[in-house]
Amino acid sequence: MTDRRGTNGSAVVHGYPHLDTARAAITALYRRLSDEGIHQYDTSVAPADVAFADHDDLHLGVQRVARALVQQLHLPDARMIVSFREMEHAASVELTAGPEYFIELNDRFRTHRRDIGAALAHEITHVLLHRLGLSFPGTRDNEILTDTVTTYLGAGWLLLDAFREDRDSSQKLGYLTPEEFGYVLAKRAMVFNEDPGIWFTSPQGYTAYTKGKAQAVRDEQQPPLTTAGWSGRHRYAKDRRYALDHPGGAGPGSGDAGRAYGFETLADGLRVSFACPTCFQRIRVPVRGRVRARCQLCHTVLDCDT
């Protein structure tokens, strides 16, 4: 797990450079667990269950927090043995067949106990993914997958709360940017009707959540959804007209990375495909005005004006 700390704010990357990978991770999670499986994680880990005061016994406190996160991630058979040592990264986990898993935390967490829950959440999610057989190729993408799954299954708000930044120093755990953590957290909140904003102790973490939430809301406002704004609907109408006039042609909206939809001409007429705003599975519907589409992966029902 990466641990980015610096003497100035430039040490932390902001924005959405990993957004496509995070979206792919959400899709992969739905495919592996199913919509019903994901809804078993309908409650996030409570702040009181992972709180760690300075006067708490270090090793007893670590075991208590680890047990809470094991329960949150539905790993009842997993026993975490946690130790501390000097290391470059924030934490690491030894992935074996179990039933015991060995987690090492950076020595600095002995005195920075408020972030122990965040470090453990990421590492215990590695255990979950190992058991599920879910991974992405390459270290970078696999770590983004881990950050995304940690957040989407109700433990990743701790990682965003560990983000702190001021004029002189900064700290961030994980591979996702703060805004990307906020985005994934907001996508989860939309599914489970949560308000994670009340859990933050870090003002910078809360700000990143609000920015990520705004980005997540924009996913719900893209054509052909009926919630799309005027400019999106106007652009969509132009692209649809082009597709109708040029059947079989690539044209705007087909394979264009700047647009979330694409048209194709089939024997029964024109169809439009777009990403489900919940799980990002592609949905294909006929172009015939108002239609209601149901995502086959996450079962979200979407009102469309095609």
Image (cartoon, grey):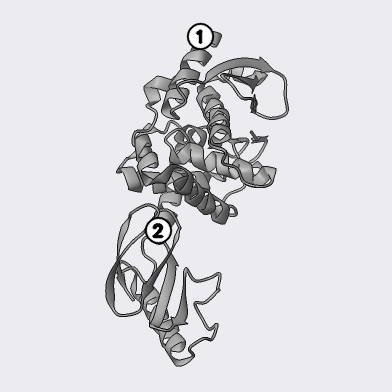
Quick one: SS at disc 2?
loop
Amino acid at the residue labelled 1: Leu
Task: Give me the residue at 43% from left, 28% from top.
Answer: 74
Residue density around tag 2, few if under 14, some if 14–19, many if 20 or more, within 10 Å: many
Q: Is residue 285 left or right of residue 245?
A: left
- Which residue is situated farthest in the bottom direction here? 245
Q: Position of residue 82 (x, y in %)?
A: 60, 16
Mark 1–mark 2 distance (CA, rounded to whole Å): 42 Å
Which label is found at residue 277?
2
Task: Give me the residue at 45% from left, 51% from top.
Answer: 211
Residue density around tag 1, few if under 14, some if 14–19, many if 20 or more, within 10 Å: few
User: Is residue 107 placed above or below 210 in the rendered structure?
Assistant: above
Q: Position of residue 160 (x, y in %)?
A: 50, 37
Q: Position of residue 262 (x, y in %)?
A: 47, 74
Nearest the viewer among 160 and 127 is 127
Q: Position of residue 137 (x, y in %)?
A: 66, 47
Which label is found at residue 60?
1
Can residue 175 be seen at all in this image of the molecule?
A: no
Task: Give me the residue at 45% from left, 50% from top.
Answer: 212
**Quadrant location, the N terminus:** top right
Nearest the viewer among 36 and 22 is 36
Q: Is residue 15 left or right of residue 305?
A: right
Can residue 108 be seen at all in this image of the molecule?
A: yes
Quick one: SS at disc 1?
helix
**Quadrant location, the C terminus:** bottom left
